[in-house]
Image (tube, grey):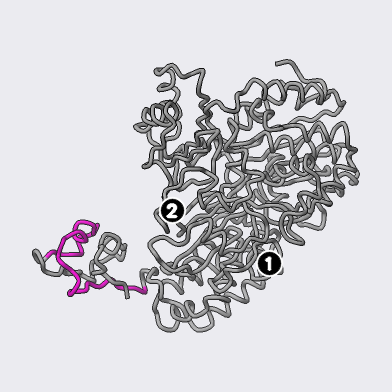
């Protein structure tokens, strides 16, 4: 492919690609995200290609490995287009039948359809699956349509047309004004208005200006940015190109975790293809605008998600934050004006330029525009990535899209915003999800992690988990974070181990106030959020641990005891086999087992295998 020298040539090539594709031709869209990889989607894709070849269907069927489709709980996923037939948990053994029955004869294979867990109804088409039905997949939707390593697929869905529009029909100032008017706020956690940041960077004095894509996603349970980079890397490149043009930058960087090998590989290929097509490099599309992008792989330090620590790492220094009185838009990377946005923010930009700020601003709430991608994980039936309009309630996300809590258990809390966020209780389930509403209840949007907890979750233990994570990830540069987070974790450990004292709750609150007021970066200032929200909404659990030496959820080992209910125990022996320390003794058939409390390590294996509720926790 020769380099494209104008927007007209780009449009000609795009139309030619679309013309050469038959919209009625069967296409097998196979999810190739990391989640489906774990379920064996690569083998499924290879088997489809082999089977179609054996049956002489190579020219009659397209087999396309795409990015993540979002419904990770049910992978590997296969969608048969143009009908959009949705098959879930597809295995290599199913391939021959799918080809012979569905592709050739048009018959539906009932066992591969999704069954609604509430009604048992089998659902044939993707858009009718409840998980997808109420989503608005503006940013994430193309993940299921395109092969991330085929630039022609991205061009076919209108890729890089926004770049052509920006370069030839808009001035840099007009681009910035359009982004400001759209109301787009940073999706990396802070929620700062994107257009305002671009404008400040453009006005800043400096011979060289940089743009950076922050793909150092490290929140436990969060993988939105990873999946976008894996499945649609060109959307991020196009967003960065438009931002660079608006700011006046000619060099960009993508800072991505080294633990994301598929995202790194697909993005490297996308950069190479864009350069070959004349969409990156010198004189892009004949506009005279030059821009290059390099990938830098981070070593997995959570603190490097913070802007100044990330830039220090890019410079080859220790990834530590600096004080904030000098803004990075004025002096950032190598002391030059620098704009940093996260993956999802950049992916929104082409949509805004193509469809207009007014269209974008109609979606969402007054101060939180557009959609947001969340990773919906934890004690939830439908685990995966969901994209919803800002303002949708927690209840709609968890129950209508997520399918509610497994095994008929009761919802207890949802933690939003990663380890820097807070835990939101059941009585706030009708809270609209946007930047401001989450902040008001003590949590935050963050990058989009959403961890659901059921009645068997101990909220004190959850707070300890996140403080343990942050203690390990603190860079240690500032004393309040280095020592304060550690002291809070120690206090929480004492409480969960049965060593809690009167005044511990107040101590945690005082330590939290100190961290919020004096830590150098957001890792420290937001670290208290899980603690403060669990104290605020679940104070009774803290008091039960401290005063009664009891864990109401039956989680904290030092505060619980496993007991055998003699009336319910049939002596089946399942718990005897499951116990790793032989603390349970069989007394014969139809006789209750005996549990030796002195040898019991409280691992819960017996409780997990017992189906008759013969083992209880007190």
The percent position of residue 410, horizontal first and vertical second, equals 44, 69
Depth check: 145 or 473 in front? 145
The percent position of residue 372, horizontal first and vertical second, equals 65, 52
Depth check: 372 or 293 in front? 372
- Where residue 252 sits, quadrant-wise, is top right
Question: Is residue 436 a member of the stretch shown in magenta?
Answer: no
Q: Nearer the viewer, mark 1 or mark 2?
A: 2
Of helix, strand and loop, which one carries label 2?
loop
Residue that badge 1 annotates: 437
In the image, residue 214 above or below residue 23 = below
Of helix, strand and loop, which one carries label 1?
helix
Q: Quadrant of the C terminus?
A: bottom left
The percent position of residue 304, horizontal first and vertical second, equals 65, 48
Few, some or many residues within 10 Å of mark 1 (<14, 14–19, 20+): some
Residue at the spot 20% in from the left edge and 59% down from the top edge: 574
- Where residue 416 sits, quadrant-wise, is bottom right
Magenta-drawn stretch, dominant element (helix, strand or loop): loop
Residue at the spot 10% in from the left edge and 67% down from the top edge: 590
Depth check: 59 or 411 in front? 59
Left or right: 504, with 598 as reference point: right
Depth check: 288 or 84 in front? 84
Residue that badge 2 annotates: 116
Please state the extent of the stretch shown in magenta in the rendering.
559-586
Residue 197 disc label: none
The percent position of residue 573, horizontal first and vertical second, equals 16, 60
Q: Quadrant of the N terminus?
A: top right
Q: CA distance from mark 1 to mark 2?
A: 31 Å
């Amino acid at each position: 492919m020769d380099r494209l020298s104008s927007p007209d040539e780009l449009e000609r090539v795009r139309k030619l690609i679309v013309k050469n594709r038959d919209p009625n031709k069967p296409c097998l869209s196979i999810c190739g995200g990391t989640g489906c990889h774990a379920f064996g989607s690569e083998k499924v894709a290879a088997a489809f290609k082999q089977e179609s070849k054996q049956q002489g269907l190579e020219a009659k069927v397209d087999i396309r490995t795409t990015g993540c489709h979002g419904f990770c709980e049910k992978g590997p996923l296969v969608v048969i287009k143009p009908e959009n037939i949705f098959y879930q948990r597809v295995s290599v053994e199913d391939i021959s039948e799918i080809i012979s029955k569905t592709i050739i004869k048009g018959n539906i294979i009932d066992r591969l359809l999704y069954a609604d867990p509430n009604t048992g109804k089998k659902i044939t088409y993707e858009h009718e699956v409840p998980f997808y039905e109420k989503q608005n997949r503006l940013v994430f939707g193309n993940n299921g349509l395109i092969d991330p390593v085929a630039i022609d697929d991205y061009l076919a869905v209108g890729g890089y047309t926004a770049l052509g529009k920006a370069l030839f029909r808009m001035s840099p100032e007009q681009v910035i004004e359009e982004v400001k008017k759209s109301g787009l706020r940073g999706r990396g956690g802070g929620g700062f208005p994107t257009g305002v940041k671009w404008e400040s960077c453009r006005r800043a004095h400096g011979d060289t200006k940089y743009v950076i894509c922050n793909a150092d996603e490290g929140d436990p349970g969060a993988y939105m940015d990873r999946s976008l980079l894996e499945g649609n890397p060109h959307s991020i490149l196009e967003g960065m190109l438009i931002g660079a043009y608006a700011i006046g930058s000619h060099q960009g960087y993508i800072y991505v975790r080294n633990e994301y090998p598929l995202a790194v590989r697909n993005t490297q290929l996308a950069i190479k293809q864009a350069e070959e097509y004349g969409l990156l490099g010198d004189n892009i599309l004949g506009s005279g605008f030059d821009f290059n992008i390099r990938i830098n792989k981070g070593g997995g330090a959570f603190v490097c998600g913070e802007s100044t620590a990330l830039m220090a790492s890019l410079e080859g220094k220790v990834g530590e934050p600096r004080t904030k009185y000098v803004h990075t838009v004025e002096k950032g990377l190598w002391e030059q004006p620098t704009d940093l946005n996260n993956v999802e923010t950049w992916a929104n930009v082409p949509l805004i330029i193509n469809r207009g700020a007014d269209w974008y601003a109609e979606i969402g709430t007054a101060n939180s525009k557009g959609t947001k991608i969340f990773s919906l994980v934890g004690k939830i039936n439908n685990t995966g990535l969901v994209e919803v309009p800002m303002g949708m309630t927690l209840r709609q996300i968890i129950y209508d899209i997520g399918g509610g809590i497994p095994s008929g258990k009761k919802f207890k809390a949802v933690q939003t915003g990663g380890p820097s966020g807070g835990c939101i209780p059941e009585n706030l389930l009708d809270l609209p999800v946007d930047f401001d509403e989450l902040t008001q209840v003590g949590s935050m949007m963050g990058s989009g992690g959403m961890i659901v907890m059921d009645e068997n979750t101990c909220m004190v233990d959850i707070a300890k988990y996140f403080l343990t994570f942050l203690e390990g990830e603190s860079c240690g540069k500032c004393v309040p974070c280095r020592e304060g987070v550690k002291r809070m974790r120690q206090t929480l450990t004492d409480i969960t181990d049965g060593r809690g004292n009167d005044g511990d709750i107040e101590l945690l609150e005082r330590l939290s106030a100190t961290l919020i007021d004096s830590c150098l970066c957001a890792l420290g200032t937001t670290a208290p959020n899980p603690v403060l929200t669990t104290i605020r909404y679940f104070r009774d659990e803290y008091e039960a641990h401290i005063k009664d030496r009891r864990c109401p959820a039956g989680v904290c080992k030092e505060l619980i005891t496993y007991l055998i209910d003699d009336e319910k125990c049939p002596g089946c022996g399942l718990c005897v086999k499951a116990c790793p320390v032989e603390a349970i003794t069989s007394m014969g058939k139809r006789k209750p087992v005996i549990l030796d409390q002195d040898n019991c390590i409280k691992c819960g294996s017996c409780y997990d295998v017992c189906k008759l509720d013969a083992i209880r926790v007190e």
